[in-house]
Amino acid sequence: MFFELLAGNLIQGVFLGAVYGMATMGLSLIFGVLKVVNVGHGAFIMVGAFITLALFDGLGISPILAIPAAFGVGLALGLFFYYTVIQRLIKAPELATLLATFSIGILLEEVIKLVFGSEFRGYNWVVGKIDLGITVVPMSKLYAGVGSVVIAVLLYLWFNRTRAGSAMRSVVEDSEGARVCGVNVGAAYAWSFALGIGLTVASGVLLTMFIPVGINPYMGGGYTLKAFVIAVLGGLASPYGAFFGGLVFGLIENGSYTLFALLPGVEPFALTRFLSFMILLVILLIRPTGLLRGK
Amino acid sequence: MKKDTGKYLPLIPVFAVYLVLFLMGKNMSGMWQLMAMLLFYCALGQAFNIFLGMTGYVDFGYVAFMGVGTYGMALSIVHLAHYEVLGAWVIVIGFIMAILFSTILSLAVGAVALRLRGAYFAIATIGVNEGFRFLIEGARIWNGSEGLIFMGELNQILGREAASVLATFWADVMVLVIAALAAAVTLVYMRSKIGYALTALREDEDAAKVMGINVTKFKIVAFVTSASFAGLVGASTWALKTPYVFPPEVFEIHYTIEAIIIVLLGGAGTLLGPVAGGLIYGLSKYYLSIFLPGFQLLIFAPIIICIIVLFPEGVVGMLKKRLRDTALGRYIV
């Protein structure tokens, strides 16, 4: 009985994990290319969630179509914040970019709160569910999981098969060398930042499929923390590492929830959040380059 | 002798501001609350500056130290109230517990996180207050998410009258004392080996290491000092002023944000900076909450971005540059 429950939760964890992974790729991409830690990461996820909500409730547009819309908005936001703020701080001490991205996150939260208010909201997308024998997976979660994998594969292809993608990789390897070879390093920085933000905002759409009524201007904070745990699991600078880190994290989160629920007198949900923080500290202590990296 | 007193001249303007705030609050009717708020922000900035300003490391989990400080005071009051011999000493024990709790948490966090560099450190700290809050709620430590309410115990210890004077007057005076102490400690650190070591590591950590400075040790010293002041601020403004403590309220990240704004506005790593930042932030927050309630953060977020991009030195940092080598310059550090 218990093992069926655990297995069922772990299957759910795979779908959640895929989305977590996709939600962290943008963070890792930005850190990998610009060496900027986006402390406002969760706020961009929140923006994606509100885009989904606005399109679905306002115009009746399916959340699947909200993904490209959110990606587009994210690109625009990314370019805007890159040219107004980040570009001026790339050479400054780390303190400056940390505080700047943190403030950008607050700004987004407050603007969204101004427009939508601060109560919890949700939308009701009825697409049925699929019975896997030991657990029932809503189709929306299935779409979200598959969508994440598709986006991750597209990103991989873009990085490895296009000119712009290899230019970006060359900047990561050696920005001076790339400049000598005629790569426009400034543009590569700008577009990496924009792409990272675009992915993050798009992931907000997918995440709404797991939180039926949890859309709120301040929902991002928890995801920032989770994204850091995942990014560190997969090696902070690697988007693909982040994707697999997300899968692992989804399994840990759902698995530990099932186990904590067996303990008497505790609140399992709060304990899983504490556990994720402990994982972060331990990994940072023993292997700051990430557990999933070969070397 | 002259050289020694000259070292501590910069404390004069800081203490003068605190004294003026205190006297204005005490003697002008209806001003006490505003002055107490300004003192709170100065104390918060002064305490946070010891770490953020002197090391250049950002601690996004700073409020956790205020939170455990609050719990230190609250637990002392709840558990010791029925020992009548102790009387008002319970409050003193509460402050000691606040220091103890915040020191222990900061040592535990610092021992792990301070081995990490800049960005990795920030990432490690971003979860501290969330992690600790969820530990309290999840494992139901210290009454879990129900929190602690100790109005009755406080009245039992001090009597109704004295408890109310404590909440409306002495708690704020305590904040003033903490702010002054934090300023004094900041200057002592600046003028000692610790300050030179921290300056070296803030400018270039690798070079400092090569020069034989034990960077981790000095970072931990600054971190623990800063954290214990935060614990004291939490114990006096939260536990004593409002006799209850709930995890979501004392681990609220907004206080970390406010501390960051204050330190940056005034000038990170300066002595007078947190005072200037605390006054500017406190006054603008006060008037914004009257004229534009609910919009403070919306207005402050772009301001922080502008400061970081355009004036990274803050108000006092710029003033210090202007006044270098003048008679006034000796008082501004």
Image (cartoon, coloured by chain):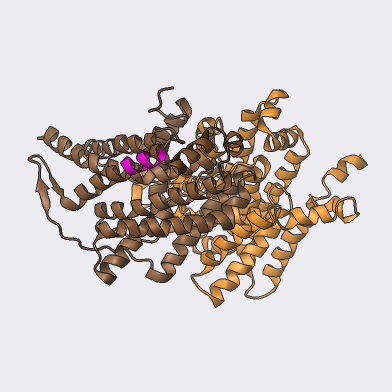
Chain colours: A brown, B orange
Q: Is residue B164 magenta?
A: no
Residue A232: x %, y % from top left? 43, 35
Report the residue that reaches farthest toward the bottom.
B291
Which residue occupies 39% across, 38% down? A161
Q: Is residue A115 left or right of residue B291?
A: left
Residue B247: x %, y % from top left? 41, 51
Magenta-highlighted residues: A152-159
Q: Is residue B67 visible?
A: no
Image quadrant assignment for residue A7: top left
Point out the image quarter for the N terminus of chain B. Answer: top right
Report the residue that reaches farthest toward the left.
A133
* Nearer to the camera, A232 or B217: A232
Residue B304: x %, y % from top left? 60, 58
Q: Is residue B169 visible?
A: yes
* Nearer to the camera, B73 or A47: A47
Which residue occupies 87% across, 45% down? B6
Above or below: residue B177 compared with residue B284: above
Residue A6: x %, y % from top left? 17, 36
Most common secondary structure along the magenta stretch: helix
Which residue occupies 45% across, 41% down? A163
Q: Is residue A93 left or right of residue B132?
A: right
Total marks in image: 0
